[in-house]
Amino acid sequence: MNVALWVIALVFAAAVALALLARRGHEMNLEQWSVGGRGFGAIFVFLLMAGEIYTTFTFLGGSGWAYGRGAPAFYILCYGTIAYTMSYFLLPVVWRYARERQLVSQADFFVQKYESRALGVLVAAVSVAALVPYLVLQLKGLGIIVSEASSGSVRPSAAVWGGAVALMFYVVISGVRGSAWTAALKDIMILGVAVGIGIYLPLHYYGSYGEMFRRVAAAKPGFLTLPDRGNSPAWFVSTVVLSALGFYMWPQYFASVYTAKDEDVFRKNAIVLPLYQLVVLFVFFTGFAAVLVVPGLAGSDADLSLLRISRATFGGPMLGLIGAAGLLTALVPGSMILIAAATILAQNVYRPLAGSVTDHRVSLLARASVPVITLVAVWLTLRGGSAIVSLLLMGYNLVTQLFPSMVLSLGRRPLVTASGAFAGIVAGVATVAYIFLSGTSVAALLPWAPAVVQDCNVGFIALIVNVVVMAVVSAATRNRLLEK
Amino acid sequence: MPQPTTPRRRRLYHWLALIPPLGMLIGVPFANRVHTLVLGWPFLLTWIVAWVLLAAACMGFLYKLDHRDTTAESSGE
């Protein structure tokens, strides 16, 4: 066992121990397990929400995009900022309602607002369909990180199994408290590691940031601006807007809103989180530094750029710390995803189907479904295939379909009917599925449209279909209600 | 749940929150035309980071104003 591996194993053990300790002094009913008894202060809520910024997707993908595509990577900095601005107004409203009605999942919100359990089951199905690929991506990232940091001495499959089993274990025992405590460790490590290497590597290899960008631009002309077609400004702006709308629609982040003990937490977070996500800058810098240091990583191998340049630069202990930080970026979001998926299955699928059941049973079932979801995710991870990345993109588009009916229900009464919301989500999801399974683009669908329209993110089409169907069905069903 | 019944004119400043997202995104096509490095960074990146900082400042400003409102409310009750 090399030094790097020892460091990773140590941090991993510390994270699991912290997560297990987090349970102390709390009776684990469903409300405690899923939403921490609605007692989290500003720091824990901050850590859970910051979880979205540093998943393996941003750690590996952020540097990978900077390395492989250049300027288009900057979109990652924009959508968070816009989502946080919206959160200032949106989340306190969601939180008040969730607290008043004792909600534990995102699907609960739809059930109560629209007074429709069927809508809850639909939202639950969409959520789980989006969450499982997201979990698979975290596990896949975990496997890559551990195997790269250990210089190949641990096989990815062994790392995936080890990570998944530990994850399953502490999620069942500690629930969202475990996520919050490990998130604290994760953020300390990420701050140190991402900022540290993002400052060190450019200066070490190029002398200054300016020199790094100058040499990268000389080697790859146009790399530091958006291209005229493809990932053009139109693509950039449309993707940012779509991602910002979908941001809080991920069930695990929507539910993390419920953990707060007062609503002012969100307003404070809206000030600090934009600043905090600037740490992604240093992940970009690492990716740019890698362009000339470890050239030749093509396609999805670009995601390895951060780890490869680290391997080329650092010795065991530092490599171990980088690997451990990466491991935690998989564990924390992974645990939140597991909790959200398990809560949704028990609360919004099992409970309405089973008729009258006790809260205790629902709580037990939620925890019992954790191993099942984990095993499905491990199986999908090990079965491999690059289809996973497109599944994740599809997942993002799936949860975004929940945005219109969520935002239209924020007032005292929803502006559309339950049937309208149901039909809109179904139409939107069907469109997303069609778009992704057929691999089409706006350019293929609208060959006559101007370039600006053609480059737009194809997810917009699904959102438009969703809203139109929702409006039409809602108008029809509302008239019928009035006739009665 | 009682909705906040503050008079409209007092919450008009909430529209300020629109400025950073709009400024950031509307500026992207224009910032993207600058192909030279500005102060060592790609201009597009500088532009985005500047707006991220402004967004944080803007939300801080709103928070201050909102906080002033709530303290005035509670002392008025």
Image: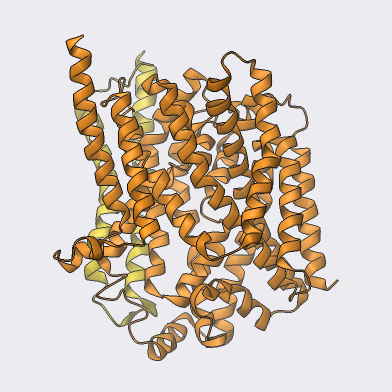
Chain colours: A orange, B yellow
Work out whether A229 lies above or below A407: below
Number of marks in picture: 0
Tell me which residue sits at (71%, 26%) in the image: A28
Work out whether A326 lies above or below A408: below
Q: Nearer the viewer, residue A315 or A55?
A: A55
Q: Nearer the viewer, residue A272 or A309?
A: A309
Q: Nearer the viewer, residue A380 or A200?
A: A380
Please identify the quarter of the rendering in which residue A416 is found: top left
Q: Nearer the viewer, residue A122 or A204?
A: A122
Tell me residue A103's x, y (percent): 51, 24
Q: Quadrant of the N terminus of chain B?
A: top left
Tell me residue B10's x, y (percent): 24, 29
Tell me residue A255's x, y (percent): 52, 35
Please identify the quarter of the rendering in which residue A221 is found: bottom left
Is residue A84 among the parts visible in the rendering? no
Work out whether A247 lies above or below B25: above
Q: Quadrant of the C terminus of chain B?
A: top left
Tell me residue A43's x, y (percent): 58, 41
Please identify the quarter of the rendering in which residue B26 is found: bottom left
Work out whether A96 lies above or below A239: above
Tell me which residue sits at (27%, 38%) in the image: B14
As drawn, which residue projects farthest toward the top?
A: A484
Tell me which residue sits at (29%, 64%) in the image: A235
Q: Is residue B51 left or right of residue A73?
A: left
Is residue B36 among the parts visible in the rendering? yes
Q: Is residue A153 left or right of residue A480?
A: right
As drawn, which residue projects farthest toward the right?
A: A1
Q: Is residue A328 left or right of residue A451?
A: right
